[in-house]
Image (cartoon, rainbow, N blue to C red):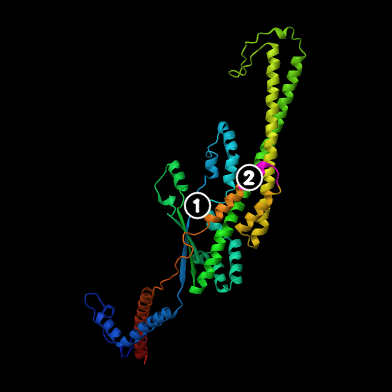
Amino acid sequence: MATSQGGGTNENSAPIEIKDGVCPENEIDLIDYFRVLWKRKYFIFLATVLPTLIAVITLFLWPKSYKVTYVYDVRDGVRDGVRDDIGGWNLNEKNYDVSLSRFYSQENLTKLYDVSGWNLNEKNYGVLLNRFYSEDNLTKLMDKFQKNGLEKYAGQLSSDDQSREFVKFEATPPFLNLSKLTVTDPEQINKIREMEALLLNVTITGKSMQDMYKLSSVVRDNIENTLPLYMAQEQLSTSVRGYNNKLAEIENNRFSLELALKNNDGVLAGLKNVNIGGLDNRPSNIVLQFDIGGQSQYLPLGYQIQAAESKKVELEENIKIKEENYRYYKDLLDLNNKILAELGNKLPSGYTTEQFKSFLISLVAGYEKPQLKDYLNSYIRATENRIAASRPITEKPKIYPIAKGTVKKSGVVFAIAFMVSVFAAFLWEGLEKNRTRIS
């Protein structure tokens, strides 16, 4: 009997031979591994094949999903943006007034309120997606699903990721990612940002062929009849703020013009009180010039009176024009607030472009001013164009079944099951050896 260092006894201990500093117990014997694999071959086979077979059968029996893609031609809806219409943002004092006059011209205001164009550049595409996937719009879609017996699809709109897979938008050609480009020229970057898509693909996914017709009808109605009104609402809000700024600008300039007119009237009254003597004998072939090089020219008193009277006429006409513009912009502001209120009140209840068009037509009869009638008629034509533009290239595209990926998914299950079964086989073998050793 041998005595251990710790005072214990080990009756079965035997000397271990160490060769070249390597303990035989630490050597890896591949034959032992193959013995384990062969010993547990039936377990590994069953543990690998059964999950794979279950996966294949499940995928085979699982209902197919279907998809349909509607393609919209967005090329004909190109309109100049607000930024282009005012000549860019690099405004100085000289071109500021010119830019404002172009911005508030009837032609540009018609474009501002034009709902007929897609104008699908990267920025507007992002606005379109944000508006469609907004909580307000998705809630409206869920209500429509409930009414059309599509309750099982309402849950797919509850999360952002699911809703974006359920209804997927894709611009063609796709917009370039500036972060992956080496372009540094600001002009080229702006051109890239203003690039517009030619086509818009909308793919809808459903769980049965029968559901696809109802689903596509509800989603199309939202895209073609509701989304344009959301976009129009945002345009109206922007334009209303612009009109308020314009009115504030006119109000601010009104005091300066009236003060200038008052000052001119005072100068004119003072000049007329001066003894002008023989003013009627002045020669008639004298040509007058004023404000040359920023210097005041001393003219005969009669000509100074004429100049002051001309200045008075000019100031009075300027004030008159400003007041006419003020009334015109005020009328447009009131009109657009009325249109904006109509959209705000009716959009939550499923308002459509056709109903919006009928509302605009009813407004025409209530206005007598020709410019407001022309504005409304132009807006109605733009709405009609938007209705016509909101139709896909093919009204009834083919519905395709979505591939289940049976081979790929079954291969993944097979690989995972095989690795787990092999690990379990070695674990099983190790447990058995421990039990044998203990016994």
Residue 120: assigned label: 1
Residues at marks 1 and 2 touching, judged by CB atoms closer than 8 Å: no
- The quarter of the picture where the N terminus appears is bottom left
The magenta stretch is 367-377
Q: Is residue 368 magenta?
A: yes
**Foreground: disc 1 or disc 2:** 2
- Determine whether, in the image, residue 203 is placed left or right of residue 364: left
Vertical arrangement, residue 265 with respect to residue 433, above or below: above
Q: Is residue 410 magenta?
A: no
Residue 189: x %, y % from top left:
44, 45
Residue 238 in sight here:
no
What residue would you read off at disc 2? Answer: 375
Q: Residue furthest right?
A: 273
Residue 355 placement: quadrant: bottom right
Q: Residue at x 31, y 86 (%)?
A: 41
Residue 58: x %, y % from top left:
43, 80
User: Callout 2 environment at 10 Å: few (<14), some (14 to 19), or many (20+)?
Assistant: some
User: Callout 1 environment at 10 Å: few (<14), some (14 to 19), or many (20+)?
Assistant: many
Of 221 and 129, which appears nearest the observer? 221
Secondary structure mainly formed by the magenta segment: helix
- The three-letter amino acid code for the residue at tag 2 is Tyr
Residue 51: assigned label: none
Residue 408: x %, y % from top left:
37, 73
- The three-letter amino acid code for the residue at tag 1 is Leu
Vertical arrangement, residue 13 with respect to residue 103, above or below: below
Q: Earlier in the sequence, mark 1 or mark 2?
A: 1
